Image (spheres, rainbow, N blue to C red):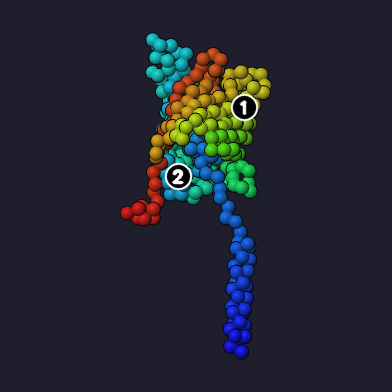
């Protein structure tokens, strides 16, 4: 009887343990797999002139210094290959959340102030092939009325609303590997006042861009914006402006991203480099420039944890 009782107790214990193991396996099987999102498709929020799908981390601040020299074909004696000239943009952008960024800036070209917002709508993962970010911006021209543009057009503003330009973009990118990332940028620009009465107020463009990492901290970048400027009717800006092409390098140095590039655009916001690019690569109208981005953490919790 004792042996039988001991045997029954052992069998009961084994049954209970088997049931527990089965229950744990069922629970583990029903636990949803945690989604891991692709990181660092690009190293900064700007590719060269234009935006990338990247946003600033929550409670972080980016300070941008963008600089464009004169044309390389402007001569050695007269202009030292363009280094005697300079246009600059200073900008700040802040991460409201990890997916939502706001920014402001000021360009010396046309004394323009710009402001924008970016939201990362879809993130690339095992289940989603691309990252999609929506971008909206505005720009205010503060030049005196009646000034002459580089194209030779004289512009007169009759109220402040005519000085406004708006831009909307859908940024779609995929990181194919640790080295290669590609992006397309459908874009629409709206000018409250076009350059000439016959010129369209709305300009449509399609941008293409990408990055290829050459080393851990060094990458080759390129972007191209194809616009409908050449389809303007006669007597407008047709033939004055060209599509924007830029080629450059990203150099990552800790908290800095340093970008060196060559482009036929002197402008550093959408209004200028998509719709007002006068330079032609074939004619040597190439402008050397650089962007410097410095990131500052304003996250008080992270600072307390590090102390």
Q: Residue at x 64, y 18 (%)?
A: 235
Task: Work out which quarter of the rendered image holds the C terminus and state it.
Answer: bottom left
Task: Work out which quarter of the rendered image holds the N terminus and state it.
Answer: bottom right
Which residue matches tag 2? 94
Q: Residue at x 59, y 43 (%)?
A: 131
Q: Residue at x 58, y 21 (%)?
A: 241
Which residue matches tag 1? 226
Front residue of 300 and 135: 300
Front residue of 117 and 173: 173
Residue neighbourhood size for the residue with mark 2, other residues' Cα within 10 Å, grouped as few (<14), some (14–19), many (≥20): many
Front residue of 302 and 67: 302
In which quarter of the view is residue 27 placed? bottom right
Residue neighbourhood size for the residue with mark 1, other residues' Cα within 10 Å, grouped as few (<14), some (14–19), many (≥20): some
Front residue of 188 and 99: 99
Q: Earlier in the sequence, mark 2 or mark 1?
A: 2
Name the disc covering residue 153, or none: none
In which quarter of the view is residue 11 placed? bottom right
Tell me, yes or no, if residue 228 can be seen here: yes
Instruction: Give x and y (percent) for residue 244.
Output: 56, 25
Query: Does 295 sit left or right of 273 as displayed?
Result: left
Instruction: Give x and y (percent) for residue 237.
Output: 60, 21
Instruction: Give x and y (percent) for residue 63.
Output: 41, 38
Q: Residue at x 62, y 27 (%)?
A: 227
Instruction: Give x and y (percent) for residue 20.
Output: 59, 72
**C-alpha distance separating marks 2 and 1:** 29 Å
Query: Does 286 sit left or right of 26 as displayed?
Result: left
């Amino acid at each position: 009887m004792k042996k039988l009782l001991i045997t029954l107790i052992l069998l009961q214990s084994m049954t209970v343990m088997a049931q527990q193991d089965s229950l744990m396996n069922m629970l583990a099987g029903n636990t949803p797999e945690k989604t891991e999102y692709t990181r660092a498709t690009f190293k900064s929020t700007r590719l060269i002139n234009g935006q990338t799908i990247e946003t600033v981390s929550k409670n972080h601040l980016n300070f941008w210094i963008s600089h464009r020299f004169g044309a390389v074909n402007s001569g050695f004696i007269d202009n030292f290959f363009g280094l005697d000239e300079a246009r600059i943009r200073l900008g700040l952008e802040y991460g409201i959340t990890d997916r939502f960024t706001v920014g402001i800036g000021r360009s010396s070209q046309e004394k323009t102030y710009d402001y924008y917002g970016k939201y990362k709508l879809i993130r690339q993962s095992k289940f989603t092939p691309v990252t999609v970010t929506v971008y909206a911006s505005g720009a205010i021209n503060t030049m005196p009325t009646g000034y002459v543009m580089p194209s030779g057009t004289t512009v007169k503003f009759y109220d402040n609303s005519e000085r406004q330009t708006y831009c909307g973009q859908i940024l779609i990118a995929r990181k194919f590997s640790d080295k290669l990332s590609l992006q397309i940028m459908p874009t629409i620009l709206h000018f409250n006042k076009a350059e000439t009465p016959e010129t369209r107020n709305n300009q449509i463009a399609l941008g293409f861009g990408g990055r290829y990492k050459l080393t851990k901290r060094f990458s080759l970048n390129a972007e191209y914006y194809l616009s409908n400027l050449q389809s303007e009717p006669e007597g407008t800006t047709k033939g004055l402006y060209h599509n924007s092409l830029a080629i450059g390098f990203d150099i990552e140095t800790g908290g800095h991203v340093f970008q060196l590039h060559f482009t036929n655009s002197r402008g550093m916001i959408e209004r200028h480099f998509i719709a007002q690019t006068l330079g032609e690569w074939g004619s040597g109208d190439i402008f050397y420039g650089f962007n410097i981005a410095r990131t500052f953490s304003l996250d008080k919790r992270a600072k307390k944890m590090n102390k």
